[in-house]
Image (cartoon, helix red, strand yellow):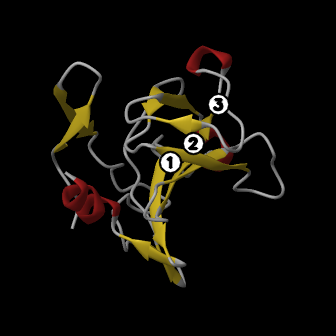
Amino acid sequence: MYAETYTNIVVYVETPFHETQIMFIIPKLREPDDFGAGYFGASRGKRKHNGIDPAAEPGAIVGSIVAGVITKIGYPYGDDLSYRYVEVTIPSGDRVRYFYVVPTDDCGTFEIGTEIEKCDPLGVVQDIAARYDTDDKKMNNHFHLEIKRNGEYLNPTDWLSEQS
């Protein structure tokens, strides 16, 4: 199954003045390419895709879909430390991870333990296609979003629907 449209998730945020409705628009998922598709559970050879891949151009700003604490700023590839991910842990203990997103000064200064709110900018999308593209194979650019609870991967689309 491939998502053809945008997914709208409505959440409510308390501000000091009043409750505000915010609609998160999850971009269309990465279209199938030579390396796979962007939906949860898509084949990755001997394993299944453990998140979703919203389509995104390099340099696009990614905002947090949750309020929580930054618990990791890591490297998804041991052989290439230019690619990054940001992990935000929410009070329930669920971990929301944004891969191929690099924190930048324009998005604020983050370190482990920084508290963030919904919609706070986390960083910018990196050019993950540059890592994989060859003369005969191409990848559609995206960032990867995954949710972990007690070591298990959850479908982010379902999880987001439950949060609103």
Percent across and percent down for residue 77 are: 74, 56
Residue 154 higher or lower than 38, as above or below:
below
Q: Quadrant of residue 66?
A: top left
Find numbered disc 1 in the image and state the secondary structure of the residue it sits on.
loop
- Whether pointer 2 and pointer 1 mark residues with C-beta atoms closer than 8 Å, the reply is yes
The residue at which mark 3 appears reads as 103
- For the N terminus, the image quarter is bottom left
Residue 164 in the figure: left or right of residue 107: left
Residue depicted at 61% across the width and 21% down the height: 108
* Residue located beneath label 2 in the image: 129
Mark 3, Cα crowd under 10 Å, few <14 / some 14-19 / many 20+, is many
Q: CA distance from mark 3 to mark 2?
A: 19 Å
Q: Are the residues tagged 3 and 2 within 8 Å (C-beta)?
A: no
- Give the residue type at disc 2: Ala
Please name which of the two marks, 3 or 1, marks the residue nearer to the observer.
Answer: 3
**Of callouts 2 and 1, which one flags the residue occurring earlier in the amino acid sequence?**
2
Q: Which mark is residue 139?
A: 1
Residue type at mark 1: give it.
Met
- Expressed as whole percent of the image width and height from the top left, the position of residue 11 reads 20, 42
User: 10 Å neighbourhood of mark 1: few (<14), some, or many (≥20)?
Assistant: many
Under mark 3, the amino acid is: Pro
Circle 2 packing at 10 Å, graded few (<14), some (14-19), many (20+), is some
Q: Nearer the viewer, residue 144 or 156?
A: 156
| Residue 63 spot, x, y in % from top left | 43, 32
